[in-house]
Image (cartoon, grey):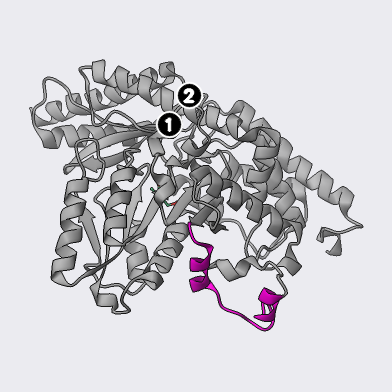
Amino acid sequence: MRSHLLNDTTAEHYRRSVTEGVERVAAKLATTARPFTGITVDALAPAIERIDLDRPLHDTTAALDELEDVYLRDAIYFHHPRYLAHLNCPVVIPAVLGEAVLSAVNSSLDTWDQSAGGTLIERKLIDWTAARIGLGDAADGVFTSGGTQSNLQALLLAREEAKTRDLATLRVLTSEVSHFSVQKSAKLLGLGPDAVVSIPVDHDKRMQTVALARELARCAEDGQVPMAVVATAGSTDFGSIDPLPEIAELCAQYGVWMHVDAAYGCGLLASLKHRDRIDGIEHADSVTVDYHKSFFQPVSSSAVLVRDAATLRHATYHAEYLNPRRMVTERIPNQVDKSLQTTRRFDALKLWMTLRVMGADGIGRLFDEVCDLAQGGWQLLAADPRFDVVVEPSLSTLVFRYVPAAVTDPASIDRANLYARKALFASGDAVVAGTKVAGRHYLKFTLLNPETTTADITAVLDLIAGHAEQYLGESLERAS
Ligand SMILES: *Cc1c(COP(=O)(O)O)cnc(C)c1O
């Protein structure tokens, strides 16, 4: 069994095994006709249930054959142009190469003595990102597992910087369409159940700054302490970007920590055409970026950035065995001093390889393409009497619903849209998402694939209309 350890004597086994896996995936990607096979849980579960984990196959090829049956054949393929559902991107090859290298070398980025160059590479990418944002010379940050963790860490720092230790009085102000990880973070941070104050959005799903100003004033009157305003630069549901310059002004006026959740919109940092859409982000005290959304990186790749490196001390604890305090004076860079995690993947290597091979412009161009595609999709939807579309996209999301002229009952329209999404998923022809707007069911395209065309959008809209019409026709028959 020692031959399965990756070391100096097993290089050939390593090369053959990984190549065999790569060949399978490459063949799969080349022949995937649909983003999904439409398999159901009930159909797939027995195949996985049957496998006895205590009876290994002792053969790589056999294990890959089995994997074909339990995973590869029926996986959801984000690289397919008709996968239009969630914030998942097709990935760029240099990043996948980075992934292969980082897991084989297996550096852990908690300390210098487990990573060496890995630590310096991560630090350089943090500095690069902070400079793109415009956070200034004192900025710092750290890679995280995702936007959820980045938001949690940012809010931890904000809580520690707040003017009171009385957790019950602390408030976090954020728009009604911000990410639910803000709520989760508030709970984890021990804030009260009413800590998150929801600020209404305007017609374009952007935070209403008049309402924000009103709430900040009300907090002051009621003896509550706003510890952070969380602005969203690219809401998960609509891609809407809060008015960052106005929010920054209010935060400065009230002395409140400004966090910008740019998990989705961070791709604009590399954009050649639309960078101005996140102007104002440079005023943030902290920023969340998810490279695994709009930088075309494999999961996980995310970071939290801060304007003032000193605030990261709130996440610092010293352990004699790992990062003793003396190492700080010895100037040994231990990233664990800045992170909520201990053992931590060298995810930064994926972005590093991407920037070294393609450059930031290469990424920005891809993201610009999907933003432009969304604009085209919006025009199609706005001109199509079968559909109602919610907002003109600021990023690459379209939220809409099928509204047949002949049907006026909103509940029937809800059911028809829900049915269309399910039927489309079951067919595997395309995968779309859904959400609720003002209590009604809508459908959603999150466009992150530059290979998707307006012809794909047209085709998927026709499929949706077909399924919805079929449902309404059948429900009419049932009623009569
Ligand atoms: C996706 C998303 C998150 C959560 O990020 P994960 O990487 O999924 O943890 C947070 N905020 C926004 C706006 C997002 O779109």
Look at the image and tell me whether residue 426 can be seen. Answer: no
The segment highlighted magenta reads 307-329
Relative to 396, is 180 above or below?
below
| Residue at the extreme bottom | 320
Secondary structure beneath dot 2 equals loop
Occupied quadrant, residue 216: bottom left
Q: Position of residue 446 (x, y in %)?
A: 40, 34
- 475 left or right of 51 in image: left
Is 139 situated left or right of 163 in this image? right
Disc on res. 351? none
Residue at figure coordinates x 13%, y 67% from the top left: 221
Q: Which residue is mark 1?
A: 447
Pinpoint residue 169: horizontal percent, then vertical percent. 23, 74
Q: Height in image: 200 above or below 218?
A: above
Q: Residue at x 52, y 67 (%)?
A: 310
Q: Are marks 1 and 2 in contact (CB under 8 Å)?
A: yes
Front in this rendered view, residue 394 or 57: 394
Q: Is residue 105 above or below residue 440?
A: below
Residue marked by disc 2? 452
Type of residue at label 2?
Answer: Thr
Q: Any magenta on residue 321?
A: yes
The tag earlier along the polypeptide, 1 or 2, is: 1
- Tell me if residue 422 comes above or below residue 321 in the rendering: above
Looking at the image, which is closer to me, 41 or 403? Answer: 403
Image quadrant holding the N terminus, namely bottom right
- The location of residue 118, given as percent across then percent down, is 71, 56
